[in-house]
Image (cartoon, rainbow, N blue to C red):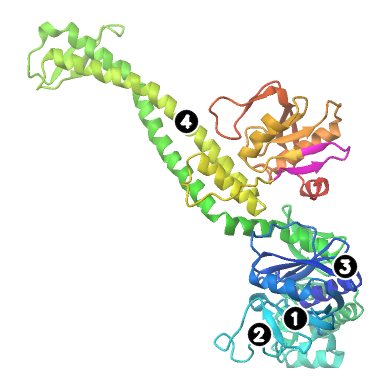
Amino acid sequence: MPLDAITLQALVAELRPQLLGLRIDKVQQPARDQVILLLRGNRRLLLNAGANAPRLQLTELLRDNPAEPPMFCMLLRKHLVGARVAEITQPLMERLVRMELDITDEFGRPGRRTLVLEAMGRRSNLILLDGDGRIIECLRRVDADLSAARQVLPGLFYQAPASGDRLPVTQETEAGFRARLAAANPERQLDAFLLDQYFGLSPLTARELAFRTTGETDSHLFGLGPAGEDRFWQEVSALIKAVKENHFAPYCLWKDGRPVEFSAFAIRQYGSGMECVRCESFSQMLDRFYEVRERQERVRQKGADLIRTATTARDRLRRKLALQEKDYAQTQDRDQLRICGDLITANLYRMERGARTLTCENYYEEGCPQVTVPLDPLLTPQQNAAKYYKRYSKAKTAERYLKEQMAIARRDLEYLESVLEEISEAETEQDFTDIRGELRDAGFLRTQGKKGINRPAKPREFCTSSGFRVLVGRNNRQNDQLTTKTADHRDLWFHTQKIHGSHVILCTQGQAVDDETIVEAAKIAAWYSQARESGNVPVDYTQVKNVKKPSGARPGMVIYSTCRTVNVTPEEELVTRLSVRR
């Protein structure tokens, strides 16, 4: 859901005491719509002006930065590096935040800059103002062609977006509320009435107020009655009081192991259909909510060509394998061809040139039943026999060849499935670069232009509750590196059983490992596999010395023996808690 004014007010109230007075050390722009201010004390303030996820928050998620910073990022660095946060404000019930920043210019004179985040869906923007309120630059320029009422361009004085004719919900009184109820269409639903009359409310909040009033989210005004109107005002006034007193708490709604909604107060309307979980902070709540979504968006944007290449190659292999299996099945009837040749040879004395069939006893079957052998009338009996023997020999050779080709196709098909899983788990630009190089080396991607400097990403790192180090490969080449080069022969190797996934190394340094550590490493292996959304996932583990890479095998393909198996259910919370931040 988009960030509403109430949740934004709660965020500002949470951030203000943490950020005031802090110095901006660095400015980064990892994505087109995202700017990160690195503040003194290792705090990372994210300002997102994307249409689907506009927000302001402290973040612990590390994002990969482009090799060359965008022009907007370089301009922000020029004006904001070294500035201190003087104030963070939000106009009444608006989805807009102003960050006032004290700066010192190149001549040593004090000054002021203002960074404005407009978190308004498709109209979201990030705007830098000078001390007089003029626009220095903005993330999205809005000229007269895009908006005749309000332009956002460098050199113009900044004007806040118009609020419209609706009333801020916090300014409502009981008398005014009852007057609006009396004048409203009785056929309107309670949540639609709130959204029509007030701004600052999200559809989720409006539905929650309706549910708390009547026990249903789709109830209508005509069904309220005097008692219902009283309850309706009580719920609305309770929300107004909470907003005025900044009485909020971060709640995230989970369904099927995924976050689907968030709010500044507990949500009851879904009952047992969703789990309402209270988070430690609003920033942590937003990190958890958007982490999966941002990863999927990165995969969609940066990995689209890789997905297309791998999917096309996989589908082509599937069709090829299906044809090979059909041809292979036909070679299994080749003995009948040899029998036909033998029967013709044994009955040459009975045959005449130009015959179309030979009817004779089949002495290969019990009872020697009569059988009809098709002939080519243009060939002699000897030539017909030779033709059957030749077809038999070709089928025998084809069987051996098809068996080899089918094994190669199945190997490549399994490899491409693992690559698609890698792409879905890719997190950084370097991850995609490594996968692209892997596909190029495997012959599934053409080499285009000059190769850049390749700096392979480091494997994912975790630390178990008992202090053991765990390494997880990001792609097939890194899986090979971890298993065959990096790991000690005494370390433990984990992999989901017959399911595509990353190689996981539990670094033991020869020490004994307790059962809890085994389970934690297995859960990490299950999380970084195709079985991430499953339960009771079988994970094999064995010492690294038992894992071998066959000669000529594709990257990431290994064989192993003498393993043990543990069944676990992947847990995102555990993986996040054990992750080592770099």
Q: Is residue 281 above or below residue 554?
A: below
* C-alpha span from label 2 to label 4: 60 Å
316 horizontally vs 33: left or right? left
Q: Is residue 505 above or below residue 89?
A: above
Residue for badge 3: 249
Residue at 61% x, 47% y is 454
State whether residue 127 is above or below residue 458.
Answer: below
The residue that label 2 is drawn on is: 154
Q: What is the magenta range?
A: 458-470
Q: Between residue 244 and residue 78, name the one nearer to us.
A: 78
Residue 488, quarter of picture: top right
> How crowded is the residue under tag 1: few (<14 C-alpha within 10 Å), some, or many (20+)?
some
Q: What is the CA distance from the residue labelled 1 to the residue labelled 4?
A: 69 Å
Mark 1: which secondary structure?
Answer: helix
Look at 90% across and 69% down and name the residue there. Answer: 18
Q: CA distance from mark 3 to mark 2?
A: 38 Å
Q: Are marks 1 and 3 in contact (CB under 8 Å)?
A: no
* Kind of residue at badge 2: Pro
Q: Pointer 1 and pointer 4: residues touching (CB < 8 Å)? A: no
Between tags 3 and 4, which lies in front? 4
Q: Earlier in the sequence, mark 1 or mark 2?
A: 2
Badge 1 or badge 4: first in the primary sequence: 1
How far apart are the alpha carbons under marks 3 and 4? 57 Å
Confirm whether residue 333 shows in the render.
Answer: no
Q: Which residue is mark 4?
A: 408
Q: Earlier in the sequence, mark 2 or mark 4?
A: 2
Q: Horizontal placement of 252 versus 537: left or right?
A: right
Magenta span contains residue 468: yes
Q: Position of residue 6 (x, y in %)?
A: 81, 76
368 vs 515, nearest the viewer: 515
Q: Which residue is mark 1?
A: 223
